[in-house]
Image: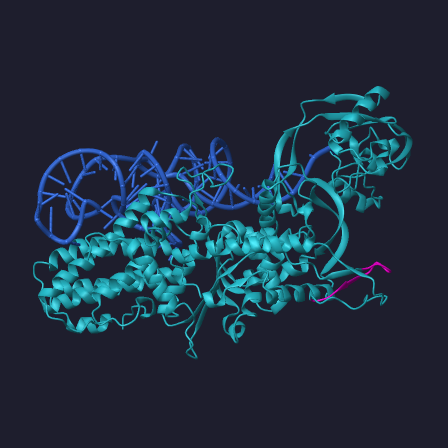
Amino acid sequence: MDKIYNHKKVEEKIYKMWEENGYFAPSTEKDKKTFSIILPPPNANAPLHFGHAMYVLEDILTRFKRMQGFKTLWLPGADHAGFETQFVFEKKLQKEGKSRFDYDRENLYNMIGDFVKDNRPVMESQLRKLGFSLDWSRTKFTLDPNIVSVVNKTFKKMHVDKLVYRTERLVNYCTFDGTSFSDLEVVYEERQNPLYYIKYGPLVLATTRPETKFGDTAVAVHPDDKRYKQYVGKDLDIETVLGKSKIKVIADKMVDREFGTGVVKITPAHDFNDFEVSLRHNLPMVQVIDLSGKMNEKAGKFAGIYAKQARKLIVQEMEQKGLIEKIDEKYKHRIGLCYKCKNPIEPLPLEQWFVKMSPLAKPAIEVVKKGKIKIYPKKFEKLYFQFLENIRDWNISRQIVWGIRIPAWKCIDCAEWTVTSGETPKECSTCKSKKLQQDEDTFDTWFSSSQWPFATLQTTKGEDYKEFYPTTVMETGYDILRWWVARMVMMGIYSTSKIPFENVVLHGLVNDPLGKKMSKSRGNIVNPLELVDQYGADAVRFALVFGTALGNDQALSYPKLQSARNFINKLWNIARFIEISRIQNSELKIQNSIKDLKKFAKNEKDKKIIAQTEELIRKITLDIEKYNFNYAAERLYEFAWHEFADKYIEDVKNRIDNNSFLALNSLFLILLRLLHPFIPFVTEEIYQRSNPSAGGSIMVESWPKNE
RNA sequence: GGAGUUGUAGCUCAGCUGGUUAGAGCGUUGCAUUGACAUUGCAAAGGUCACAGGUUCGAAUCCUGUCAGCUCCACCA
């Protein structure tokens, strides 16, 4: 054996051996208890980041349960990541001097498909490098035809159940990317913009967006505001840049009397609050900005001009006409931006598909309150409830091609919608017309990923759904508790009448060495695979688990990586010591259980370390079962190094005989089995060397027990 | 604006339902060693457990408030 452990010589070879022997697939023996995890599908098109490396917790659980004899499935997959991927692809087109508008829908889709196909193996090989014992024979992709079919069926069912509806709603629309975004995808930033005080007949109101005034359908004041009481309910005659006009004054509590003059213009088509007000007061909606961000015909002579420029022109003209009382140039406010391109979001009315969320949220709250689904650590339950109790309807339409096209057709004759579970309808379900046109939009990526646990298991092999659903554990980062976990619970219960998983285990974020969030814009991203290359997969895995409690963030720590590597080397050298000692001692049959070992042991010190190991087995088993991975890792580190090596081996090395050698060798093999889920490669390599009678692999050996 | 979360040794963090002298890794200091391992061993120094109150026989641990950091949510023209 080499003096120092070299991960580069063993990791690839071992992973290949595992995979070729089919160890990752669930055992086919009947009547075993099952354990299943669905891997949160990484973006097929992007390399892994540290968040993905944290899935090592899933590998630990999977390997642990597999050794315990469970029929164990850890199912891999990849996400098409709709907008995310199309965005990257369009950037690429841009470099080639092209844009998505140069291609028709089908070609664009296929081009992105090819692009993703080329990149997906990168992500998958990285999961392998981390040693993840995923069953590759069951790998799924969110755009696999049978997954698409499941997603379409769900949509159809929801349509029948009247849980989806189509309506014109204000959406967060990015006129640069040409798509709408969910509330979660809008980022807010403080900006300084002029606040214009505009004369509306006898009233003056403050606004940052005078160009939307053509879409005003009312002016609002607070119901208790004495200054304006006399105007409420009346129509004002106002002067505008487009001539004389009339506007109604309404009273609504949404108005802040302290802001500006206490008078607000109501533009239902271009402001979220105004839209809400318009629903309460039955106000018409007048759209004046179109999807390209330009003023439309309602803006008269300003039609065709980008809203931002139109604003300047309109203000100029208003000033000439004396319609502006004053301008506060230093007004600061927060505005919504597109999280991708950082341009201001334009609230626009657009017909979209929405999911009614409150009927879905109720059972999802229930199952956690009743303990049918447990969330670890418990502190995240609050976030979960907070989200579900205040949930709003979910806009699932996206104006991109890279995704699952919505299976809904609009009738050209009667304008009604026909929804199918994917197949093209022969005729309009309302008027039987044959003139149908499919919705151009695709589903929000999260609409398909929220169905992932059952969509995958229903479309893999034979009995998978029956055997493995609900899955045992859903492990992911706490940052997507609302985006993904909560939605999976809702959609899972809705579609299958069962919870999708029994336990939710949430890990924290891995930040940069200074504790700052890793992000592209900060430029502080560390590639986990480079560290795997440098320190070995085992060291990276161990460092991620060691010293961080579940659900807490951690700063990437090079000292910790080094100490993890040193620990692995320590184990290697324990093995070397055993090999050297073996030469001088005749071989005895290795004892696999503590019980048998106890019978053999003669020396008191040997008996003591056997008893300590017995206690260790008990604790490690409990630690993993309670998802206290850090305790388990710390305890194993402490025991292997400072008890087993520093004390026991130091003692035994001077008195070693056949009987003690047996204890030493057997105990070490037990220790390796306990360590295997955490650091699979080195334990496998050593196991093969230190167990003369070993036939197979440590990963299919049994978990140490005390009987 | 609302909520959550964190604040423990120089640094990174453990400390599980409150209970004897508060732990680890790295770093620091001293000593040892051709040893299975210098990716080593032995030992030492180092903490008013953010701050102020309170509950308790007893609090790093529970409660209240203050300060600081981080995150999420809402987003007022």
Chain B colour as displayed: blue
Residue at the image point whose x is 13% and y is 55% from the top: A650
Magenta run includes residue A449: no
Give the quarter of the figure containing the C terminus of chain A.
Answer: bottom left
Total number of numbered discs in the rendering: 0
Using the rendered view, name the quadrant where residue A600 is placed. bottom left
Q: Residue A491: image x %, image y %?
A: 61, 62
Left or right, residue B65 beside residue A270? left
Using the rendered view, name the quadrant where residue A198 is placed. top right
- Up the image or down, A543 lies above or below A700; here it is above
- Up the image or down, A168 lies above or below A361; here it is above
Residue at the image point whose x is 77% and y is 41% from the top: A290
Left or right, residue A381 beside residue A269? left
Residue at the extreme bottom: A30
- Label the cyan chain with its letter: A
- Up the image or down, B14 lies above or below A488; here it is above
Pick the front one: A331 or A344: A344
- Which stretch did the figure color magenta? A411-421
